[in-house]
Image (tube, rainbow, N blue to C red):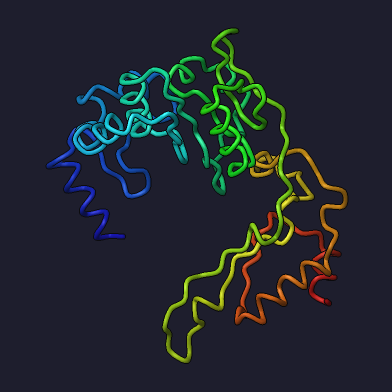
């Protein structure tokens, strides 16, 4: 980390000045204001990413002339720049933001503000709020077949006829524990170490939020839909069976990534 920080300091002073390069966030630029993002994106003097994107990415977008572009993750100066390259070349291209939710960040937390942000939706056509994998398929089918985006659940989009930002209804596909199981890749280790193939991240109850939901500082629960499927913390036997199958395949260590599990439920799970 110290070496990387020295590198960032040198790069900032001798190459990217007046832009400061950071370890955590790339270049230190304002990425909160949509107005600043859009106004600065195509200005090389105000966008430290511009020259690289213009030289290495712009032609790829122009040559492929895509019908849809997926912007993955947080909306950044770099991705707005790419979106504007595409829009200027083909105003009909549909640009959708997806996969923006992380442990502490999600556009779903600020939906009320996004509904007022017409400037952003001059560049972005839609934002997927939930159920990414299935909703992406629905948007793809809708755009390719020239359908109406009102029919696609779990999104924010700009209705060009009404000139307003619309949030469609929330309808989430039920998720299963297998959807939230991530085993580590295999590796060779010494006898005193745990092999990566023996470890797994598992979300035991993928359709559940934190059951307590009383921490005033917490916004994590807002990432999840408001729909519950009966007793969210039921089916302990099925979950134990899933863990047993993983154990039989050589996985001995588990990191449970649920937001919270009620004490009675985790006790029952442990006993089983």
Residue at 35% x, 20% y is 90
Residue at 64% x, 60% y is 257
The number of callouts visible is 0
Horizontally, is 243 left or right of 9 in the view? right
Residue at 22% x, 39% y is 56
* Quadrant where the N terminus is found in the figure: bottom left
- Give the percent coordinates (x, y) of residue 206: 71, 54
Horizontally, is 240 left or right of 255 in the view? right
Please identify the residue farthest to the bottom as the structure is shown. 191
Residue at 32% x, 37% y is 28
> Residue 252 falls in which quadrant of the image?
bottom right
- Give the percent coordinates (x, y) of residue 184: 51, 70
Comparing 230 with 139, the one in front is: 139
- Give the percent coordinates (x, y) of residue 33: 43, 23
* Quadrant where the C terminus is found in the figure: bottom right
Horizontally, is 9 left or right of 248 in the view? left
Horizontally, is 95 left or right of 253 in the view? left
Comparing 54 with 120, the one in front is: 54
Please identify the residue farthest to the front as the structure is shown. 145
Residue 49 versus residue 269 in the image, above or below: above
Comparing 167 with 257, the one in front is: 167
- Give the percent coordinates (x, y) of residue 84: 34, 23
Please identify the residue farthest to the left as the structure is shown. 14
Please identify the residue farthest to the top as the structure is shown. 162
């Amino acid at each position: 980390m110290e070496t990387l920080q020295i590198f960032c300091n040198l790069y900032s002073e001798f190459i990217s000045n007046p832009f400061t390069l950071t370890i955590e966030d790339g270049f230190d630029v304002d990425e909160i204001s949509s107005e600043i993002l859009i106004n600065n994106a195509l200005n090389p003097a105000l966008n430290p990413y511009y020259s690289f994107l213009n030289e290495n990415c712009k032609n790829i977008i122009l040559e492929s002339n895509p019908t849809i572009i997926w912007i993955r993750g947080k909306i950044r100066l770099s991705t707005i720049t790419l979106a504007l390259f595409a829009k200027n070349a083909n105003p009909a291209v549909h640009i959708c933001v997806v996969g923006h939710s992380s442990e502490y960040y999600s556009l779903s937390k600020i939906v009320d503000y996004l509904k007022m942000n017409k400037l952003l939706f001059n560049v972005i056509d839609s934002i997927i709020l939930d159920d990414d994998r299935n909703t992406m398929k629905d948007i793809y089918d809708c755009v390719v077949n020239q359908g109406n985006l009102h029919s696609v659940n779990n999104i924010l989009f700009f209705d060009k006829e009404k000139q307003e930002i619309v949030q469609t209804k929330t309808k989430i596909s039920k998720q299963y524990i297998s959807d939230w199981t991530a085993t580590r890749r295999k590796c060779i280790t010494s006898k005193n170490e745990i092999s990566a193939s023996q470890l797994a991240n598992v979300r035991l109850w993928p359709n559940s939020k934190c059951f307590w939901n009383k921490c005033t500082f917490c916004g994590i629960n807002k990432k999840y839909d408001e729909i519950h499927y009966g007793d969210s913390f039921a089916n302990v036997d099925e979950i134990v069976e899933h863990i047993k199958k993983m154990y039989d395949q050589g996985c001995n260590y588990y990191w449970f990534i649920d937001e919270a599990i009620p004490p009675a439920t985790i006790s029952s799970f442990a006993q089983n």
